[in-house]
Image (cartoon, helix red, strand yellow):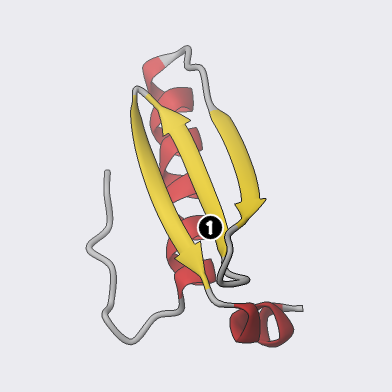
Amino acid sequence: MDKKPNPETSAVAKAVAKIEAEVRDGLNHGHFDLGISCRITNSGKRELVVKAGKNYRFLIPENELKQSA
């Protein structure tokens, strides 16, 4: 059910799409465990980690936060 990310898509959109895909896949499967964490790196980027069997890491630049608000 994974969608191929569009290279022109923002990191926020890719992260949200991954979260949605994992939730939908888990619902179809019948059970799942999903964890999401975020921290600010030294460079000011947000490091978002989606833990769903595997860890998926997204680095989100600060300028994208203003666009997605």
Residue in view at x 44 percent, y 57 percent: 58
Q: Quadrant of residue 40?
A: bottom right
Furthest toward the left, the residue is 4
Furthest toward the front, the residue is 42
Above or below residue 47? Residue 23 is: above
* 32 lies left or right of 42: left
Residue in view at x 58 percent, y 59 percent: 41
Above or below residue 67? Residue 6 is: above
Residue closer to the observer: 17 or 15 = 15
Picture quarter with the N terminus: top left
Q: Residues within 10 Å of mark 1 (few under 14, many from 20)?
A: few
Residue closer to the observer: 37 or 15 = 37
Above or below residue 69? Residue 52 is: above
Residue kind at label 1, given as amino acid type = Val
Residue closer to the observer: 42 or 7 = 42
Q: Position of residue 16 (x, y in %)?
A: 53, 58
Q: Position of residue 59 (x, y in %)?
A: 46, 63
Residue closer to the observer: 51 or 16 = 51
Furthest toward the right, the residue is 69
Above or below residue 58? Residue 12 is: below
Count of labels shown? 1
Q: Position of residue 53 (x, y in %)?
A: 34, 22
* 49 lies left or right of 69: left
Residue in view at x 41 percent, y 28 percent: 52
Picture quarter with the C terminus: bottom right
Q: Position of residue 22 (x, y in %)?
A: 43, 37
Q: Could you say whether the residue bearing mark 1 is in a helix, strand or loop? A: helix
Residue of label 1: 16
Residue in view at x 55 percent, y 77 percent: 61
